[in-house]
Image (spheres, coloured by chain):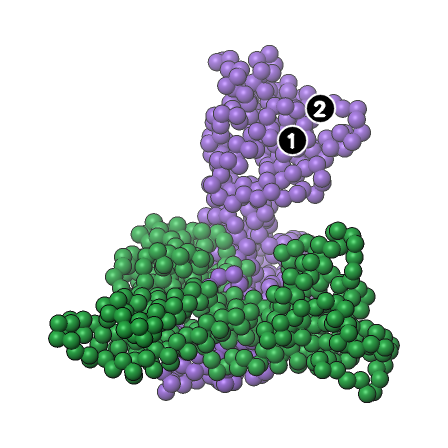
Chain colours: A green, B purple
Amino acid sequence: MKRIYRQDTICAPISGMGGAIMMVRLSGNNAISLAEECFIPKNKSLSLTKSETHRVYFGDLMDDSLLLDECLLTVFAENHSYTGEQSVEFGLHASPFILQQLLSLLIRKGARMADPGEFTLRAYLNGKMDLTQAESVADLISSTSRSAHRAAITQLKGNFSKKLQLLRKQLLDFASLIELELDFAEEDVEFADRSRFLILLEEIKTEIETLIHSYKIGNVLKKGVPVAIIGKPNVGKSTLLNALLQEDKAIVSEIAGTTRDVIEDTINIQGVLFRFVDTAGIHNSLDQIEQLGIKRTFQKIEEARIVLLVVDSKEISDSSIEKIIQETKLSIDLKEQELIVLVNKIDEFPMKTNFESSFNWIPISAKSKFNIEQLENRLSKYVAQFKLEDQSIVTNARHLEALQHSHESLINISNGFKDNLPTDLISIDMRTCLYHLGSITGDISTDELLGNIFSHFCIGK
Amino acid sequence: MKRIYRQDTICAPISGMGGAIMMVRLSGNNAISLAEECFIPKNKSLSLTKSETHRVYFGDLMDDSLLLDECLLTVFAENHSYTGEQSVEFGLHASPFILQQLLSLLIRKGARMADPGEFTLRAYLNGKMDLTQAESVADLISSTSRSAHRAAITQLKGNFSKKLQLLRKQLLDFASLIELELDFAEEDVEFADRSRFLILLEEIKTEIETLIHSYKIGNVLKKGVPVAIIGKPNVGKSTLLNALLQEDKAIVSEIAGTTRDVIEDTINIQGVLFRFVDTAGIHNSLDQIEQLGIKRTFQKIEEARIVLLVVDSKEISDSSIEKIIQETKLSIDLKEQELIVLVNKIDEFPMKTNFESSFNWIPISAKSKFNIEQLENRLSKYVAQFKLEDQSIVTNARHLEALQHSHESLINISNGFKDNLPTDLISIDMRTCLYHLGSITGDISTDELLGNIFSHFCIGK
C-alpha cells in the first residue's frame, strides 16, 4: 500500500567509516538528475537520467570544478530501490573530509540530510515493506547470535506479517458481515454465522496467545537467555564461567549488571546468546552488606530461565542433591525455569557409582573442563525445545503490546456474543481488535506511531 | 604493466561497521562462480557468470539452505574492477554476525581472507594503478583537510607519476644510446650527444630538486603546518588559541605533544590543517624544571614553519618589537620560517597611531576576537604562496628517499661526463638513477618493497 508524502531528495551515509569504502545514498524525486550534476562518468556520453536501473558507473565526483573523489555510482530507478524512490548510491573512499564535502555539495544542490530511519520510513510509505519488516532491519543489524539473527531475518522476510495479515483478513471478512447487518438493522437479518464465527474467534485467540507467549523466548533470544550460576562459596562457580568463556569461539563480552555486585557475561553457545550471571555465593550471613548481595542473588535466580546449581562432589559423597537444594533455600519455579545441577570437582572427588537423584544433574570438572561440552549441549537443547525454526517469534515490545490489546478485544467480542450484546457494541470491539492487529504491520498507522518507531533508528537506515 | 601472481579468490569487508550497510568484496579468478553458489537472485533464471559487468542484483544470500541476509550483489568483470580481476561486492545489513557468517561461508567455498592492502596490491599488479597511485589511496582516506585531500587526489589521478615517468623516459632514451655505445665500444663511436645530454641532465636535476623541495611543504600539509605560539607569560597565548579554536567550524582535535608540557591543537583553517603548539612562556627562570620547559619551547620554535610571537600592547607603548624579540632571545630562521608578531590586548591598551616596525605585525584582541580573521587570512596566505594547485607535491617519505638517491646519481653522472670518466662507469650511475626513479611509480619493484608498502594498509584496502 502506497501512502502520500513529500518525496523531496534526501541524503545520508549508509555505511560506517573506518574501512576503505563508504556508501552515501541519495533518494527522492530528484535524486538522479541531482547526482548527474556532481558526477562525470568515465564514459562521458552517458546520461544518468537515461540509465537503466541497477547499473554501476565509474567516474569523477566533482564539487563544481574541483575533483572530490573517484567513485562508483549506482542508479536505482523508482520502484526498484530500497526506498521505492529513484535513488543513487555513491561508493567513495572512506575519508571524513570527502564525506563532509559531498554532503554539503548535495545539500547545496537541493537535497537535505535524511532524518534517522527516513530511508526505511520511505520504504514503508512506498509499500516496499510493512512495519514489522522495517523494524526487523534494526534488529537484523544489531543481531549478534544465530538465534537473534534468525528471528530478525524471518521477520524481514515478512513471515510474521503474513501470519498476522491472514488472521486480520479472516476477522475483517467477518466484521464486514457484521457491519452489513448493522446497515440492515431494521430488517433483523444475520449475514454472519455466529457459531462459525465463535470457532474462528477461538482459533485467532489461540494463535495470538501463542504469539504473546513466544515473546518471552523471543525477547530472551534477543537479549540472551538468562542463566544464573549459583552455589555455596568456593564450589567453583567462577571457574565454571571461565571454562564456558574459554570454550567459546564467538562473541564474548562482559557487561556490568544492574547491581554493582552482579557481573554478567554474554556467551554465544552454538548460535544462541546466553547471559550468565555469576551470583554471590549463597550462605547464611549476619553481615548486612553480604545479606544484600544474597538478596540480589535470589532476585537474579527468579529472573533466570536456567539455573545452574553448582555443588561440590565432596558434599555429594555424604549428602543428596535434594538436601543441598533444601539448604540453599532455593525457590525455583520448575514450570518456568530449568534447573541443572552441576556436580563439580569430579576429578578430585569421584562420585559413588550408584549415585541417583531425581534432579537433572551432570558431573563436571570446571578446572579440567570435563563435561563442559555436555553442559553446553544441554543449554542448547533447552532453547531447541522452543522449535524456533517452525514458529513466528515476537521479539518486539510494541508488537507484544498490540497483540495483548487485540487479545483483550477478542475476549470482549467472544463474551459479547455469549452475552447476546447488541451487534453495534460488539462491532466496536471488533474495530479495536482490527486496529491493533493492523498497527503491528502498519496497515493502520499514525504519524505518532511512525515517529516513535523511526526516531529510534540511526541516520542512514 | 601486468605482473604474474597467484590470482586465488580473496575476500574482506571493505567498508566499516556502524552504519546500516556494509560492503564485502570477493576478488580473484573464481569470484563470480563462488558468489553464485551463495546467492539466489530475485530473478531466479539469472546466471551471475553470464552477467555483464557493473550490474547490481537483489537477492537472498544463502548459507547453504539457511537465509543469511537479503543483499545487493554487484558484478565486476575482469579488467573492469578495482583489482582488475573479476570481483563481486556484497551490500549487506551491517551486522557483525552476518559478516562473520558470510566470511566463513566464502572461506568454506574456497576463498581466503585478503591480506592488508591486498586488493590495492592486486590493482597495482594488474596495471590498474602505479605505486604512487596505490599509496595515495591510503592518504586520500586519511585526509582531513582540503589541502591534504588535494595532494592525495592529485596523486591518485597519476599527475605525479606522469611527471616522473616523463623524466625517466627522457633519461632512459639517452641511457639506451649510451648502452649502445658500449656495445660498439671498439669502434669508438658516440651515438649520444654529450652537450645535449648535459642540458637534459640539468633539466631533470632541477625538476627533481623542485620535487624534493616540495616534500617540506607536502609533509607539512599532510600532518598540519606547525605553528608555535610564543611570548612572555600572561600575554594571552592560550586565549589566542581558544579564539582560533572557536572561530573554526571544521575538525578540531587535541593531541598530546611529545613532551608532557607541550600541548598541540590541530585546527582546520580555510581548508589547511595547522598544528598549533602553545608553548611555555619564555622568561628568565632559575627553576630547573621551568628551564626544561623553556628549552623544549625553543625546540618547538625551531620545528615550526610559522612563529606567532604574542606581545602585550602595553609593552609596545614604551618599547619596540625589535627590543622584545631581542629580550626573548628568539632565534628564528627568517628564510625558512615566517614570523608574525601579534600585538594583543589592543582593546585594553590602544597603540600609538604612528607605531612602526620592520616586522610583520597585526594588532589583535584575542579576548574580543578582534582581527582574528585577519590572522587566519595571513596563515592561509602563507600556505597559498606554495601554489599547491600548480605543482606536484611529494608527501611520501619513500618517494623523497628515492628522489634523493636519483639526485645523487644525477650529480655523479654529470661529474662523470665532466671528468671524462669511461662510459661504462657512467652507465652504472645511470642505471642506479633509473632504478630509483622507477621504484617510485613501481615500474621497478621488489617483493620487499611491495611488502613494505602494502603491509601498512588495512584489511579491505
Q: Is residue A63 visible in this depiction of the protein?
A: no
N-terminal-most mark, 1 or 2? 2
Q: Position of residue B229 (x, y in %)?
A: 61, 32
Q: Is residue B321 visible in this depiction of the protein?
A: yes
Closer to the camera, B61 or B179? B61
Q: Which dot marks residue B332?
A: 1
Q: Position of residue A161 (x, y in %)?
A: 38, 74
At label 1, the amino acid type is Ile
Q: Which dot marks residue A4?
A: none
Residue at figure coordinates x 58%, y 15% from the top left: B314
Location of the C terminus of chain B by quadrant is bottom right
On the rendered structure, is A243 left or right of A44? right
Disc 2 target residue: B283
Circle 2 residues within 10 Å: few <14, some 14–19, many ≥20: some
**To which chain does the residue with label 1 belong?**
B
At label 2, the amino acid type is His
Query: Please, is residue A268 above or below residue B364 in the view?
Result: below
Circle 1 residues within 10 Å: few <14, some 14–19, many ≥20: some
Q: Position of residue B132 (x, y in %)?
A: 55, 61
Closer to the camera, B335 or B306? B306
Dot 1 and dot 2 residues touching (CB under 8 Å): no
Residue at figure coordinates x 78%, y 66% from the top left: A232
Mark 1 to mark 2 CA distance (whole Å): 17 Å
Query: Please, is residue B316 above or below residue A198 in the view?
Result: above
Residue at figure coordinates x 59%, y 73% from the top left: A336
Rendered image quadrant of residue A327 = bottom right
Q: Position of residue B330 (x, y in %)?
A: 67, 27
